Image (cartoon, rainbow, N blue to C red):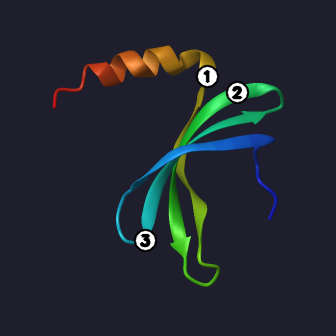
Amino acid sequence: MASFWDKEELLGSITKNSREEIQIKQVSKNGREYVDIRTFWYDSNDDTYKPSQKGVAIPLESIDDLKSILENIKL
């Protein structure tokens, strides 16, 4: 199956549970750049992770806003 994105680069992933992980990718579509943060589910038939509809594509020009918000998280 062909990818939705014209270009994609996996930046990292976070294990959500035994069947899902969150993948963070830098992607592009029609000349626009995004950071895609999406839940992927494990397909044991193919032994691969597949994208779910649970996610968000943030325009690259908004990443500084996202960083500012994340810096306010109290650990």
In this rendering, is residue 27 above or below 51? above
In this rendering, is residue 65 above or below 44? above
Q: Is residue 7 left or right of residue 26?
A: right
Exactly how many numbered labels are in the figure?
3
| Residue at 71% across, 42% down | 8
Task: Give the x, y percent position of residue 13.
Answer: 47, 50
Asked whether disc 1 touches disc 2, contact meaning CB atoms under 8 Å apart, the reply is yes
Badge 1, how many Cα within 10 Å: few under 14, some, many 20+?
Answer: some
CA distance separating discs 2 and 3: 29 Å
What residue type is disc 3 on?
A: Arg
| Residue behind mark 1 | 60
What residue type is disc 1 on?
A: Leu
Task: Give the x, y percent position of residue 10.
Answer: 60, 45
Task: Give the x, y percent position of residue 12.
Answer: 50, 45
Residue 33: mark: 2
Residue 32: mark: none
The quadrant in which residue 73 appears is top left
Q: Quadrant of the N terminus?
A: bottom right
Specify which label sits upstream in the sequence, 2 or 3.
3
| Residue at 83% across, 31% down | 30
| Residue at 35% across, 20% down | 69
Q: Nearer the viewer, residue 7 or 65?
A: 7
| Residue at 41% across, 20% down | 67
Specify which label sits upstream in the sequence, 1 or 2.
2
| Residue behind mark 3 | 19
